[in-house]
Amino acid sequence: MSQLNQRHILVAISGGIAAYKGAELVRLLKKQGAVVRVVLSRGATEFITPLTLQALSGEPTHTELLDEAAEAGMGHIELARWADLMIIAPATADVLARLAQGRADDLLTTVALATPAPVAVAPAMNQQMWSHAATQENVQLLASRNIQIIGPDAGEQACGDVGPGRLLEPDGIVAALNQRFENRQLEGKRVIITAGPTLEAIDPVRYLSNHSSGKMGYALAGACAAAGAQVALISGPVQLAPPDRVSMHPVTSAEEMCAAALSLAEGADLFIGAAAVADYRPESPASTKLKKQSGGPLTLTLVENPDIIAQVTQLPNRPALVAGFAAETTSVLVHAREKRVRKGLDMIIANDVADPQTTFGSEQNAVHLITEAGERSLPLASKRVIAEQIISALAAQLPH
Ligand code: C5P
């Protein structure tokens, strides 16, 4: 499957003669399964119409920074956050200069500054402009900021010159973007992940549980498999399709999850506890449906569930790395730091579930990674992007 499948790709087209190739780029990205939105600079609209891009992408084209109607639909900050990757193609000499300066004087440059997603540029300009020291210095500066430079190609130019500065053909740009998402950083590693809620039976038809959707754990499992790992996903009941190339271990209660985790985690390379395990379970679930007792209150006696991740860190042959989540509503970092130490974790991923944008079931997340060596924030992005960033951080800590 293409690495671009289901990715949110923001294509920004700036005003050069190669702008027409932006249409082909959008078409090819859609063919790979990407969800594409397009930003056109004002100059680009002289070469290609918003309607063409709208028809190809199936989404409204964005052209203005200060447009009330557009901002009411998907504003520029939302657009910046929506993207898993932004590709500016063609990127003119002027756009490269404005990006290098960090300007935000139109929609394209503003979104490029505001997005937490990776940014790539495919330059296209006259060969003399490309070779100019100013452009070359700008390109070097952008590359040093981790902006991917795709192309340019050399050859015949629209102005009649011959030399470097032609936009790389759209299929070459798509190949470069596909490669960017490909990584084999967990090649040959064995990863165990817990995800979703647990259900604790009260009687045959009722249970205690929580609002965990499993989305973060499933995104992590998918990202690990895409990075080359052999993944076992121990999942409580959720409404999600199993990720590709992941071996599924469905469970219901915390005790079942614990048994599965302890048998699979022995000797693994990485264990990630993303499940929202119920802290307590009814001491003795009724074997038949409890009847309503008119008038009086019903008392349930609850006993504590095993702390799965803390038991995993105590295994004789414990996984090389153990990471957990701390979903908190107050003093998030204080609680998370304490939990990391108490449970013997190598990393804890702190997550504010009081914030509606990052709570259970949301499509996006923003987290804070805490290890013994230091801390790092990952700003709001899709759970898929957050999962990939967490996996990169963990892969960097794994012994080779
Ligand atoms: O203590 P708390 O539930 O906040 O800890 C969160 C971390 O511990 C998560 O990684 C969660 O999967 C894990 N955990 C566990 N078993 C429990 C409770 C939490 O593995 N009984």
Image: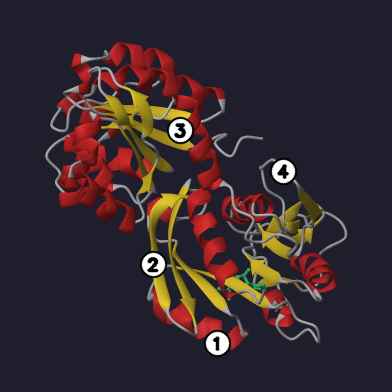
Q: Which mark, residue 341?
A: 1
Q: Are marks 3 and 2 in contact (CB under 8 Å)?
A: no
Identify the amino acid type marked 2.
Ser
Q: Is residue 369 left or right of residue 65?
A: right
Q: Nearer the viewer, mark 4 or mark 1?
A: 4
Identify the residue at image location x=39%, y=37%.
Answer: 151
Q: Is residue 387 left or right of residue 93?
A: right
Q: Are marks 1 and 2 in contact (CB under 8 Å)?
A: no
Q: Residues within 10 Å of mark 3 (few under 14, many from 20)?
A: many
Q: Quadrant of ligand 1?
A: bottom right
Q: Nearer the viewer, mark 1 or mark 3?
A: 3
Q: Quickly name the residue at label 4.
A: 244
SS class, disc 2: strand
Identify the amino acid type marked 3.
Ile
Q: Quickly name the residue at label 2.
A: 377
Identify the amino acid type marked 1.
Val
Is residue 239 shown above or below 369? above
Whole-number angstrom distance, CA of label 1 to CA of label 3: 45 Å
Task: Find residue 353 and report its horizontal and vertical position in percent.
Answer: 44, 61
Q: Is residue 183 left or right of residue 56?
A: right
Q: Is 276 or 267 nearer to us in this picture? A: 267
Q: Is 105 or 243 nearer to us in this picture? A: 105
Task: Find residue 296 and report its horizontal and vertical position in percent.
Answer: 65, 64
